[in-house]
Amino acid sequence: MNYTSTRNNRLSVSASFAIANGISAEGGLFVPESIPHTDAAFIASLAPLSYTERARKILPLFLTDYTEKELKAYTAAAYGSQFEGPAPAPVTPLHDNVSVLELWHGPTCAFKDMALQLLPHLLTGAAKRVLEGKESVILVATSGDTGKAALEGFKDVAGTRILVFFPDKGVSPMQKLQMTTQEGNNVGVCAIEGNFDDAQTGVKAIFTDAGVKERLLKNNMCFSSANSINWGRLVPQIVYFFSAYADLLAKGAIANGEKINFCVPTGNFGNILAGWYAKRMGLPVNKLICASNENDVLTEFLTTGRYNRCRTFHTTVSPSMDILISSNLERLIFHLLGNDSDETNRLFAALKENGEYTVSDALLEEIKATFAAGCCNDDATKAAIADTYREHGYLCDTHTGVAVRVYEAYRAAGDMTPSVIVSTASPYKFSKAVLGALTDGRFTAENEFDMVSELEAFTGIPAPAPLKGLKGKTPRFTNVCTQAEMEAQVYGLLGIED
Ligand SMILES: *Cc1c(COP(=O)(O)O)cnc(C)c1O
């Protein structure tokens, strides 16, 4: 199976090429030329398997230039003991025929681990084939969560190096400690004076600088990217939609072939798009329900066909969904247009120039046949967290709270199909907001570790070990530099100074 670009459908490259390059040269996103099909027997065969075994049946359908041996080793390394509990992506009953798919049992306690634990391995396989075995250097500018998830994923993966820059005063104390105490022999972390945009601009400048590139080449290294539009981050996510269905099947909660809904808390549209690929592959999905916070650009688009980024940006208690441009939507539109890159180019040029585009009525009808959408504000999110805990004894984080709220409104409108709410972070990653929701703001803890303890005491639900284990750790990376000093930091961290 080959991959093409959303901005140039004459292109045809291997999965390795798509993953090693991240983005296509003309700015498009890599997408599979065709979508593999699975049948009821295939889905039934997943039911008795472990998560890793399920991944080994689904990934080869897309990653046809990877060997069975490679994928076996990669999935074993990615979904091992770094995930706490009995399974990497367990399904927990919530009420009636509604369950929660928990994607936060990995090392950083959020759903990005599902992809970022596997991506580094996919990248090393790709590098062997298309980068002539050069060491892949990943540069990340982070506002917090992605940097840590990338560090944990790349940590000690042979043939890779990872360097993360974060704004010194722009991340939470917990996030800072998570990064500065990072273990591993191929990692580097540096704070920068300035905000996230300064870090991002600095990273982009280094990434595209010919002199830096040359210096790396001399040391048999080259830059690769781990950002959320890399196909290597999307494809691992398809697995857990099949896995959730297989779990329900194994429990006898549904019959094979019975359709289910998924409700996904959405930002960049990567998670829910993986669900769309699963549906296209033949997974019996009725509706994909897209849940947004007050940043409701997707709610408007999926219900009216108009995407308009010119709106107020809201900072919410579900920060990973605070987004105005959902990059992965481009892939959906390209596919629904029948792989028409000219029309995709026209729409996204309009987005760039005018901040908006509108799709045809026919396309909107197709979207509505698969997607439902809803949004809610912070008060509704907190109410959903409190209600879910009180009524069902289930503790959810703020992002999941948005999904619960949007799902309950959708269900109340009449569709009682068995449903899975996708949960994207541990409640302990957002202890302050969750504790506030449960206690109506009446709690005593003042720092994040005390809030974790207070939430544990209040609910009796233990916090994940990776978060508790940070307490009392001594930072390993204490450098702070200016944007202008970032290049020198890169050489220093890579050990390739003159
Ligand atoms: C990244 C993230 C999301 C949004 O996922 P997308 O794939 O960007 O739609 C939701 N919740 C959490 C906790 C996240 O980290």
Image (spheres, rainbow, N blue to C red):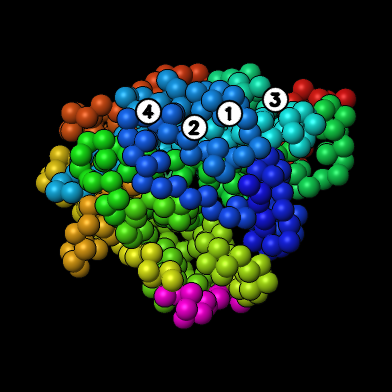
Could you give the CA–CA distance between mark 2 and mark 3, rounded to whole angstroms?
A: 23 Å
Horizontal side of residue 277 vs 386, given as left or right? right
Residue 176: percent from left, percent from top: 50, 33
Sequence order check, earlier mark of 3 and 1: 1
- Residue at 54% x, 25% y is 72
Could you give the CA–CA distance between mark 4 and mark 3, rounded to whole angstroms?
A: 28 Å
Q: Is residue 417 visible?
A: yes
Question: Which residue is labeled 1 in the image?
Answer: 68
- Residue 110 image label: none
- The extreme front residue here reads 41
Disc 4 vs disc 3: which is toward the camera? 4
* Magenta highlight range: 352-365
- Residue 56 image label: 2
Horizontal side of residue 427 vs 111, given as left or right? left
> What amino acid is at disc 1?
Glu
Tally the numbered discs. 4
Sequence order check, earlier mark of 4 and 2: 4
Of residues 425 and 86, the one nearer the viewer is: 86
Could you give the CA–CA distance between mark 1 and mark 4, rounded to whole angstroms?
A: 17 Å
Residue 25: percent from left, percent from top: 75, 54
- The extreme left residue here reads 391
Rendered position, 219 above or below 238: above
Question: Which residue is labeled 3 in the image?
Answer: 159
**Contact, CB < 8 Å: mark 1 with mark 4?**
no
Rendered position, 1 above or below 103: below
Residue 195 lies in the magenta stretch: no
- Helix or strand or loop: what does disc 2 sit on? helix
Disc 2 vs disc 3: which is toward the camera? 2
- Residue 50 image label: 4
> What amino acid is at disc 4?
Ser
